[in-house]
Image (cartoon, rainbow, N blue to C red):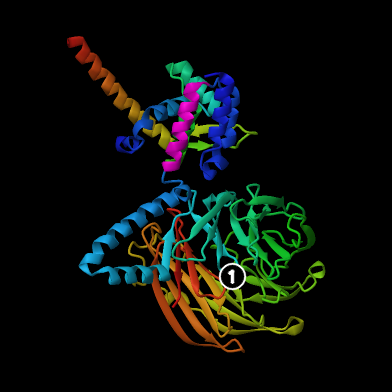
Amino acid sequence: MKPAVADRLSRVLVGCYPPRWKQRYAAEMLDVLDQHRTGLRTVLSLAGAVLSTHLDPSYRMEAHPLARMTKDAWLAVAIAVAVPSGVLVPLVVTQVAKNVRESSWRPSGEGAVAAVAFSRNRRILVSAAGGTPWDATSTLWDVADQAKPRPLSVFEGGNPITISPDGRTVATNAFSGKPALWNVTRPRHPARLAVLSAGFSGALWGEAFSPDGRILAVASTSRLVLWNVADPARPRLLRALTAPLRQRGPAPVLFGVGNADLVFSRDGHILAAVSGSDQVTVWNVTRPADAGRVATLTGPRDYFTALAFSPGGNLLAGVTYHGSLLVFRLGGAGRQARVSILPGILATARYPGGGTAPAVPCAPGCGPAVAASAGFTQDGHGLTVVIDRPETDPATAARDTVFTWRVASSGALSDLTTIYRDVRGVHPTLAPGARIVVDGSLTGGQIHLWNLP
Amino acid sequence: MHGKFDDLGRFADPSVLILTSLADGPKHGYAIMTDIAAFSGARMEPGTLYGALSRLERRGWIRPLAAGERRRPYEITAAGREILAGQLRSMQQIVRTGRQRTATA
């Protein structure tokens, strides 16, 4: 084989690797090919390696259609066997019922599933998986059929990650540690639009789109920055805000999962952000360029890890690291009142199997490791909080405890109901409307989705 | 420990060569290929090299260092050194046994 032909074929073959592989290794391989004397052996070696990589279970997204075909083929065989024996109906009903209630799958890439976020219509989910926030892989999923999530594309981007309400733009942590915007209008072909470097400093920990998708709030350890992303290809810096801290303490960095600690009210006029070690700062962003602080909310001396606005925007719920739930009522002109505080919800959260402690005792000094998510129901009459309690080794199992209260317009809570479910994952996130729970696994790179009854 | 290495199956040989190459310091892809050719005479192709590199990286036996332009050097980890030492002991045993048996045949 002529060297020029071998070289050309080799480069074509590098392009045939799975997307995740190409993102990680293609540039290096092309660099090696630039220096290597290519020949028939090179082409054959690459062809074998491409095939082998596609069959590698680590590249699940690429293997997924094949795996699903295999599963479907077995199901067809089972049905063919079941029809004569009269057990078809119960078999199918059981399968459907299970699928409607929950699903579990592995994203492409390795390491922890560090973040998931939903589009407003709950049809698109984006996940970030990887060892570190700046070395992760984002996967876009079609979850319209929750029983069979379909991977749409894989691209580079780490935690935090969020998706615009219309599902057309994704904000991630670029590998430089700065926020980046991606155009996912064509969800199978995401394209990076911009890295938001201006005005940015500190470590990135939160991103949130306003409900109309025109403003992106970016939170770092040093400031909160508002961007006009009405045209996401040409983002404009609007305002950099710094919250005065009640007490000096470590700044929030990558709490839990998702962006629950940085939230807009449903009308987009109010933005609440965890700030410092024990407070939430509330900003009026009606006119983002003139955004100003309207309130500083404090609770027990404890980190807030999850925030949620009521649909009317007058109530803000917060869950703290040690498991206290606080509800604040927000009035006009910066007036606010704390109307409910439930300090002990962690005590009623359960470990796998129903115990109040992990099967293997936690080492002395280890923290409560509370990952929580909070959300109000669509009608605003219910407040749901999910707390996940993992075994000491989170690879073994975890249990979600879902608390739902009736909420009065005053913010008073009543009529608690509690649901438990064993899951494979330790970072719960509630979808908009608070009826779908997604758990991302710290180990084993798994996503677990289930519906609340 | 050898059981872990057995998981590599047909990739065991390239993995030993790569770990050996990295044992004296970090190298990027092409430097690993040329080093292996120099000390073993084996010509490793890019497809084989990167297949083995990804497996070794996943097992935590090598780690990537910061990339410069398109080149990313790799270094062997403590676990990788331990695995390599165990594998070399096994190979020494094979060599010793093979020599004894071919000498007496």
- Seen in the picture, residue A282 relative to A256 is either above or below; the reply is below
* Chain identity of mark 1: A
Q: Quadrant of residue B61?
A: top left
Q: Which residue: 29% across, 71% down?
A: A89
- Seen in the picture, residue A145 relative to A38 is either above or below; the reply is below
Q: Which residue: 80% across, 71% down?
A: A287
Residue located beneath label 1 in the image: A121
Q: Quadrant of residue A306?
A: bottom right
Q: Position of residue A156 (x, y in %)?
A: 59, 48
Q: Position of residue B94 (x, y in %)?
A: 27, 22
Q: Which residue: 47% across, 18% down?
A: B37
**Front residue (pair B20, A91):** A91
The three-letter code of the residue at mark 1 reads: Asn
Is A208 a magenta residue? no
Q: Quadrant of residue B86?
A: top left
Residue B40 appearing in the image: yes
**Front residue (pair A90, A37):** A90
| Region of the chain picked out in magenta, as a range | A39-55
Q: What secondary structure is the stretch in magenta mostly built from?
A: helix
Element assignment for label 1: loop
